[in-house]
Amino acid sequence: MTDDYNFAYLDEETKRMIRRAILKGVAIPGYQVPFASREMPMPYGWGTGGVQVTAACLTPEDRLKVIDQGADDTTNAVSIRKFFHRTAGVDTTEATAEATIIQTRHRIPETPLAEGQILVFQVPIPEPLRFLEPRETETRKMHELEEYGLMHVKLYEDIARHGRIATAYAYPVLVEDRYVMDPSPIPKFDNPKLDDNPAILLFGAGREQRIYALPPYTKVVSLDFEDHPFEPSKADHDCDLCGASDTYLDEVITDDRGGRMFVCSDTDHCRTRRAAGHAGRLGAVA
Amino acid sequence: MQTDRMSGSLSGGFADPARDAARAFRAVLEAMARPGTIHAMAGALPPGPCSPAAGAVLLTLADRTTPVHLAPSHDRPELRDWIAFHTGAPIVAAEGATFALGDWPGLQPLDRFAVGLPDYPDRSATLIVEMPALEPAGARLTGPGIRDAAWLSLPEVAAFAANRALFPLGFDTILTAGDRLAALPRTTRVEAA
């Protein structure tokens, strides 16, 4: 750990401002709290919002895990993990169950979360209505009045055009029967994990300067219609490495003759399963 | 006398501000996210009658940008000096307060405090209520953050039930006793047990 920075990089005044925003977010589940997002030593889109939320929550005793699309070993995840190891001196881990804070880009780990854990989502566009209504003044009014008809029209048009709701990620949810919320671009496969989760779920959007939250055991419902109920979906395969049939899969092209394999997007979950003796179509037992 | 008062206000802050504030915030976050749970909140030694837990909340969350209201029970020169030195927060009337500190009778009437705006419900006050003790018994709590139900010793039920009815508007409450802390966000449904 370096002493050249304040603990967890951010100055104390900034952390207080972020901490106040997080607490209001927790008190109003699904409502986007504006905050004075700072420039971070990484570009927008690389998790500046998540990093600021993580920095405000970290204690010296925490064990941090960072994933990017489920993987612990991608550039973004490795960089953020090293960043906090260096500026906060915290231990890091790749094991979901051992982590106290997990920062994630676009996945919820397969291993169920527990009380005492915090999951921090990196959010590009926090406003679920933004692509339907570009004006912030209007979307704010729509949230105030619970005027969410436009979102249902959008989902209905999906059905009219494609025969089903075509939204596959960033699938909108209704929180505690009040606020429609963007769960960040997680696959809709992960949406059911938002509901009644024992962990604290925090969302940080750096460029858009918004923080929102889901306290534990909060009611989160994916929007749908009676005759077109919400369906979490995944590739119709088993993991080729660990054989899991219940995990979210990445499709990997293996050659230029149409060869492909499907593997767990959650690298920690897949490795743990292989270590326990599970093997898929192409996987040798680790 | 004046010198004593001043030197008293200079001590009692966090020994290791960044790390102590980080630990204190996590306690507040866990308390606010899990209404009814009681957490240790140490590290601050404010002048009486302010409890160590309430002092730590102020050190962690209050600064020049967050006006603080002191109820009559807590409006003492020593505490004003301590807050001024350690946080820089201006002391204001109830109507303009981001944080309000006091015992339950001193904080009445509650309708003076900001409950947020319909389009910005986050612009609401957070009450720091000093209690004689905190027990996981008394009023029954349900709502976000609570798996089935939780119980917490509250100063009264009706005021919190009325606050819940304002949702998404409303104030949020942190309850402190000695070095212990619990919280009650506006979402919690409160019933007499």
Image (spheres, coloured by chain):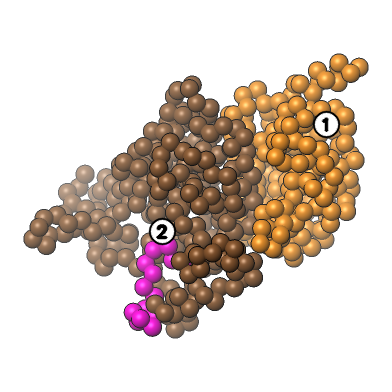
Chain colours: A brown, B orange
The answer to whether residue A241 is left or right of residue A128 is left
Whether residue B136 is situated above or below residue B76 in the rendered picture: below
Type of the residue with mark 1: Arg
Q: On the rendered image, what quadrant is the C terminus of chain B found in?
A: bottom right
Disc 2 crowd, CA 10 A, few/some/many (<14, 14-19, 20+): many
Whether residue A198 is situated above or below residue A97 in the rendered picture: below
Q: Main secondary structure of the magenta part?
A: loop
Q: Label 1 to label 2, Cα distance in Å?
A: 47 Å
Judging by the rendered image, the residue that carries numbered circle 2 is: A185
**Residue at x 70%, y 53% (from the top left corner):** B123
**Residue at x 17%, y 49% (from the top left corner):** A284
Q: On the rendered image, what quadrant is the N terminus of chain B found in?
A: top right
**Residue at x 54%, y 64% (from the top left corner):** A135
Disc assigned to residue B80: 1
The span picked out in magenta is A159-173
| Observer-nearest of A192 and A161 | A161
Disc 1 crowd, CA 10 A, few/some/many (<14, 14-19, 20+): some
Q: Position of residue A118 (x, y in %)?
A: 51, 46
The verdict on a common chain for dots 1 and 2 is no
- Mark 1 lies on a secondary structure that is helix
Q: Chain of mark 1?
A: B
Disc assigned to residue A235: none
Q: Position of residue A242 (x, y in %)?
A: 24, 53
The answer to whether residue A75 is left or right of residue B18 is left
Q: Position of residue A238 (x, y in %)?
A: 24, 62
Q: Is residue A199 magenta?
A: no
